[in-house]
Every structure is written in structure tokens, then in C-alpha cells.
Image (tube, grey):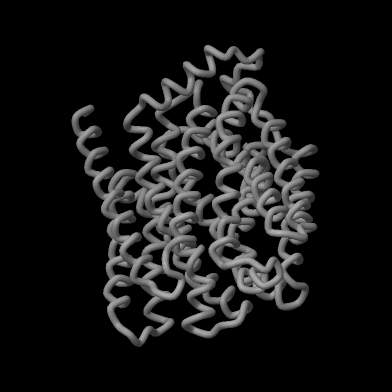
Amino acid sequence: MVIAKSSTILIILAFIVTIIATDIYLPSFPAMAIFFNCSPDALQLSIPFYMLGGLLSTPIFGIFSDHFGRKWTIIWGLGAFILGSSLCLGASSLILLLIGRFVQGIGGIAVPVVGWAAIQDHYPGQKGATVMSWIGCIVSLGPLLAPSLGGYIDTAFGWRGNFFFIFGFALCILILMIFYLSEHKGPIQKKEIDTAEVIHSYTVVFKNKKFLAYIILYSCLICGELCYLTIIPFFFQSRMYLTSDFIGIYISSVSIAYFAGTFLASQTIQRIGVNKSILVGIIVAFIGALTLLFLSFFQSLFLIPILLAIGFYMAGAALVWGPTTSAALQLFTERKGAASAVRSLVITSALGIGGFVGSVLDDFSIKPLAIFLVLMCILSLFLYFYLDKKNNTNK
């Protein structure tokens, strides 16, 4: 149990550094657009480029973790993430930055793909859902602190300082993992990879409709969240006239809601169960999206109501994260690594879509963003009722 806890801590730290790579540099967007002499839309592509890298490498890490073990698969992935971070740090043009973000994404996705499978190996059943919710509570501190930290780093050291911080943080975790990350002793098949078997494993996972419904349900909400994160730095600068440090503070303040949502998820799972916790999360997110849509019809926009509306949406998404992750992965045993890879594949695709949609929507209005968030909540609600029907049929 001590070994399981220490490995879980290292996985959490690795996930924090890869997830803050998404938003620590958001307050630097306006300054980076000037440095690279590019439009905001062009710079915003650095977010979907990160997701695209993860999208392409996800299936590889899933199969490797099932065949060669969790430890070295996640270590090699984190090493690739560090390489990408160094490329971003030294980028002298937008093209080089996008290449660095792509390589970051290739390696960074290994942490959720392999890490969540490893945690579910150690904590089966409803215990796994509770543990994942507590983990969500802890890792949400990364997005909570990252934009604010990134704003101060940008003010003190410029935009490159953010990538230097990510590089150093990830390198320290990599060294610790080499010496202290334990290898799981479960049903991992350490043997040569057979192409037909790989195709069969992923086919079995993709054919599981309940698994896909759980994952896509959460993916819809996280897609809306990335759309918001892509738009909001430029919106705050153009409509609220905020500087990079204050942009970071306000983005971080909204992330408090995500932290609260993940904390409440561990409580609601124990009291009302996994599936009802998912419904509560969707409803909370829906309230936030509808409130933001209502606010968008007023010409005079105020910062606090906007932040509260977005906060409700993010709290709802956080409530859904732990239960859907555990419920989906618990549907498999021997193919848990492949299932975790497919989960990350779907979620990464959703993140990429959210970042792309954010790059094409109007940066100077919240109405298109609000409409998009409402649509994502409707899709999530539809999938919930589909799952509820499937679960009742199987009883």
C-alpha cells in the first residue's frame, strides 16, 4: 500500500506538470503574438498542436503499457515531453513553437494514458472512482495556480520563463520516477507486440458503447472548457483592458471552481453513487453555460458575473471527471491500458476541437462561447440518459 501511494503521488505530480503546460502560458498570449509577429488566431493554434501530438501517440502508449509495463512507458513519455518543452523554450519563430508544442503533446499524453490505468490497477471498484475524484481534486491545483503563476513569471522573466519552469519541473519528476516509481504486478502481458492482437484490443474497446458514452460525455464538457481558455486571454485584454498578470489571476480564480467540483465529487460518489454524481455535474455545468448566455445579451459586461458563470461550468465538469474516468476504465481488466489510451484519445480530440473552435470564434464577444458551452452540456445530458437506460437494462 505504501508503494502504491508513493507511485500515485509521482503520477499526480507528472500529470500536474503536463496539464499546466496547457495553460501556464495563456497570460503571455498577447505578448507572444507581438514577439512572433503573428495574429492571435495563429498563436492560439499552439493549443490544438499540443493536443494533436497526444492524439497521434496515445494508441502507442496504451499498448506499450499493457505489454512492457507502466513504469518505463510513462518515463519515456515524460522524457519526450521534456524535449518538447526545451524546443518551446528556445523557439525563435511561431513554426518552431508549434513543433515544440507538438512534441510536448506526444510525450505528455503518456501520463494520463499510463498513469490512470496504473491507479485503477491498485484501486478497483467504487474505491477507484473515489480515489480518482480525490486525485482530480489534487491535480486541479495545477490549472488553478498555473495561469496566475504564469502571469507573474511573464511579468518577471518574459514568456520563455514559463517554458523554463515546465522544463525544470518535469525533469525533477523524471529523475524521481526512475528511482521510486514501482512496476505493477498485475495482468500486464510482457511479450512481443503482435499487430493483430493490438488491432483486436482496440477493436474490443471501441465496440464497448458504454465505455465510449462515459468518455464522450466528459469530453463534451472539457471541449467547452478549452474553448473558453483559448478565447478568454484576448477577451480580457480587449474588453476588460487587463495586463498579463491580472489575466492570469482571473483565469486562476475561475479554476477554484474546478477544485471545488473535484472535492465535492468524492463526497457525492459516496452518498448518491457514481451515475447520479455525473448527472449533478452536468446540471451544474448547464446552469453556468445558460447564465453566461444570458449575460452575453447585455452590452455592459461585468467581470465578476462572467467569472461566476464560467466557475459553475467548470465545477460541473470537475464533478463529472472522476466518476466517468473510473466507470469507463472499470469496464476492462486485461485491456485497461488500451482502454485508458482510447479514453485519452477521445479526450485529447475533444481538447483539440475546443482549442480550434476557440481560435475561430470571435475573441471580443462571449456570446459565441456561451452558445458553444450550452451545446456541449446538451450533448452530455443526452449521453447521460443513454447510459442511464443502458444501466437500467442490464440490471
Residue 238 in view of the camera: yes
Residue 149 in view of the camera: no
State the residue at coordinates (40%, 40%): 215
Q: Camera-side residue: 253 or 355? A: 355
Q: Camera-side residue: 169 or 326? A: 169
State the residue at coordinates (62%, 41%): 111
296 over 102 or under it: above or below: below
Residue 50: horizontal and vertical position, in percent? 60, 49
| Quadrant occupied by the C terminus | top left
Residue 333: horizontal and vertical position, in percent? 47, 24
Please, which residue is most extreme toward the bottom here?
300
Residue 16: horizontal and vertical position, in percent? 62, 53
State the residue at coordinates (34%, 60%): 372
Count of numbered labels shown in the rendering: 0
Q: Camera-side residue: 265 or 22? A: 22
| 345 to the left or right of 211 | right
| 278 to the left or right of 139 | left
State the residue at coordinates (62%, 36%): 1
Residue 217: horizontal and vertical position, in percent? 35, 45
